[in-house]
Amino acid sequence: MRQLSHQLSLSTRGKGLYSISRQVESWVAESGMRQGLLTVFMQHTSASLVIQENADPDVQSDLEKFFARLVPEGDPIYDHTTEGPDDMPAHVRAALTQTSLSIPLVAGALALGVWQGVYVFEHRSSGQRRNVMLHLLGD
Amino acid sequence: MRQLSHQLSLSTRGKGLYSISRQVESWVAESGMRQGLLTVFMQHTSASLVIQENADPDVQSDLEKFFARLVPEGDPIYDHTTEGPDDMPAHVRAALTQTSLSIPLVAGALALGVWQGVYVFEHRSSGQRRNVMLHLLGD
Amino acid sequence: MRQLSHQLSLSTRGKGLYSISRQVESWVAESGMRQGLLTVFMQHTSASLVIQENADPDVQSDLEKFFARLVPEGDPIYDHTTEGPDDMPAHVRAALTQTSLSIPLVAGALALGVWQGVYVFEHRSSGQRRNVMLHLLGD
């Protein structure tokens, strides 16, 4: 059994979901491993990870709309406001979704269902550089 | 160190929590491993996973009631409506809970607390066939 | 490759976030491992885990305020009320956050971003003794 890690970097352009399925799957394929465990880890607290439907892009924009309403900007309960009106809502949205995902690798493929894609969920309004650490353990 | 994987399938009968603790624990026991890491992975985007109290069944129905109110059907903000009024809420509920769980195996037993059970959280109204991938790495 | 596990115990003093970063990082450092996968697992259903900003303490109190409002005590939809008005909200808050976290260990350090800390999120009003299982797999 062996392990590999790789830092994936991407630029986001405002709130919403950004697919990283292709980058993740090709990195796993290059490893040559057939069975193992993939960990996807978001190295920020104002962006997060979700596994969501990869078919209809409306799912991705509807998710963004739901979270924008559930965690509104300018909420008077917050004291942490110096980094902008979208910053504290970004931390809350990250707490409500995932910082890490664990995906088994079985028979040479990630165990994602047919309609499942892996997404970075950006919670800040402005463009950001985001780092995601990938770790693969297996053989 | 070695690894095993197994796809667990179950039929759901509408929204709510379905315990898979017994199936998961007996599969882990059959492996004969004493120490390791169990990954539980939901292969769908309109059902998810939660670890919740296994004592009072009211906890499970109260959870369902909370999520039904937080993410109501027929919400006018959604564009993704062709798969039914419960479909987009199902994706949101999945994003708010878990697609993967990681549970250590210590001294021959999963490290679950006394009151913790592993549940599939079904978010669609109609009966569904759900696949959950189990992966165990250890010795 | 080898594995280690350790149960971390802490006392909480009411709802809110409690940093466990230092304890987690020193246990990982003592292991002498350079590359691997850390799993952090909360062994209760009325407390949970989050990775959040470790710089401004207002982020932690603002998170608590958001969850207190989103999941209020005394909500008339609950049947599970015998353990107190904060008990069922605690289970909901746990379902909305994390029971397990997976953090890669890369080049001798956890892959946490500069501003990321690991927190126990206590959801009960009274002081509690909480157990968190740590598991490390690597070399």
Image: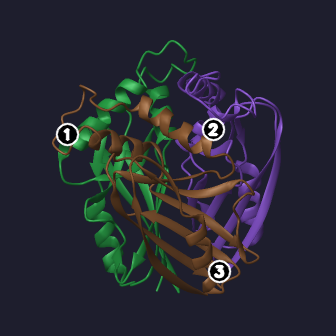
Chain colours: A green, B brown, C purple
| Viewer-nearest residue: B115 or C139 | B115
Q: Quadrant of residue C30?
A: bottom right
Q: What residue did someone put label 1 on? A: B80
Contact (CB < 8 A) between labels 1 and 2?
Answer: no
* Of marks 3 and 1, the one in the foreground: 3
Considering only order in the chain, which callout, 1 or 3, is on the residue closer to the N terminus? 3
Residue B52 placement (x, y as % from top left): 61, 50
Labels 1 and 2 positioned on one and the same chain: no
Q: Amino acid at mark 3?
A: Ala
Using the image, determine if residue A76 lies above or below residue B97: above
Q: Amino acid at mark 1?
A: His
Q: Which mark is residue B21?
A: none
Using the image, determine if residue A137 lies above or below residue A15: below
Q: Amino acid at mark 2?
A: Asn
Between the C-alphas of marks 3 and 1, the distance is 42 Å
Q: What residue did someone put label 2 on? A: C54
Chain ID at mark 3: B
* Of marks 2 and 3, the one in the foreground: 3
Instruction: Residue at 62%, 72% (x, y): give it.
Output: B25
Between the C-alphas of marks 2 and 3, the distance is 39 Å
Residue A135 placement (x, y as % from top left): 48, 68
Q: Residues within 10 Å of mark 2 (few under 14, many from 20)?
A: some
Q: What residue did someone put label 3 on? A: B29
Question: Which type of secondary structure does the marked residue at label 2 adopt?
Answer: loop
Chain ID at mark 1: B
